[in-house]
Amino acid sequence: MIRTKIAALYADAAPYGGKEITVCGWARTTRDMKNFGFIELNDGSTVGSLQVVMERDKLDNYDEVARQNVGTAFIVKGVLVCTPEARQPFELKA
C-alpha cells in the first residue's frame, strides 16, 4: 500500500486528480445521509482535513463505516476529485 499524505494534496492536488489514492487518518466528523455520507479525515500531516464521500451503492461495508464515531482510524482508497470552484479544493470518492 502506498499512502498519500493529506499535506501532499494541499501542496499540489493536480497530479492526484482523477487517480486512485490511499489515505490513512482519523475521523474528525462522520455524517450519514442514508444513501451517502461524509468523513472528515485528518492524518496529522497538516491542519487541513480531507472530505471523504461514500455512497451506499458503491461500498459493500457502507453501514459498518457509517456507524463509526469521531476518532476512528480509517484506511481509505478512492479517486481524488478536484473541485476548485467549491469550498474545499478536492474530495475523495471512496
Image (tube, rainbow, N blue to C red):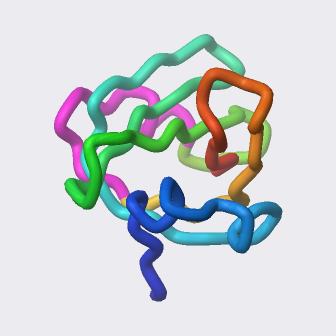
In the rendered structure, which segment of residues is drawn in magenta?
62-74
Q: State the residue lying farthest toward the bottom.
A: 1
Quarter of the image for residue 53 reads: top right
Q: Residue at x 61, y 71 (%)?
A: 21
Q: Residue 42 magenta-drawn?
A: no
Q: Is residue 53 above or below residue 79?
A: above
Q: Is residue 31 left or right of residue 54?
A: left
Residue farthest to the top, as pictured: 33
Q: Residue 66 colored magenta?
A: yes
Query: How far across and how far down the image is residue 29, in percent?
Result: 33, 24
Task: Name the residue: 37% across, 42% down.
Answer: 41
Q: Is residue 4 above or below residue 32?
A: below
Who's the residue at 39% across and 60% down the image?
Answer: 7
Find residue 73 and report its horizontal and vertical position in percent.
24, 51
Coordinates of residue 58 in the picture (x, y in percent): 76, 46
Q: Nearer the viewer, residue 28 or 94?
A: 28
* Front in this rendered view, residue 79 or 73: 79
Direction front: furthest residue: 11
> 33 left or right of 14?
left
Number of marks present in the image shown: 0
Left or right for 21, reference 51: right
Q: Nearer the viewer, residue 20 or 35?
A: 20
* Image point (50%, 54%), residue name: 10
**Residue 72 position (above or below residue 87):** below
Q: Where residue 32 sits in the image (x, y, percent)?
A: 52, 17
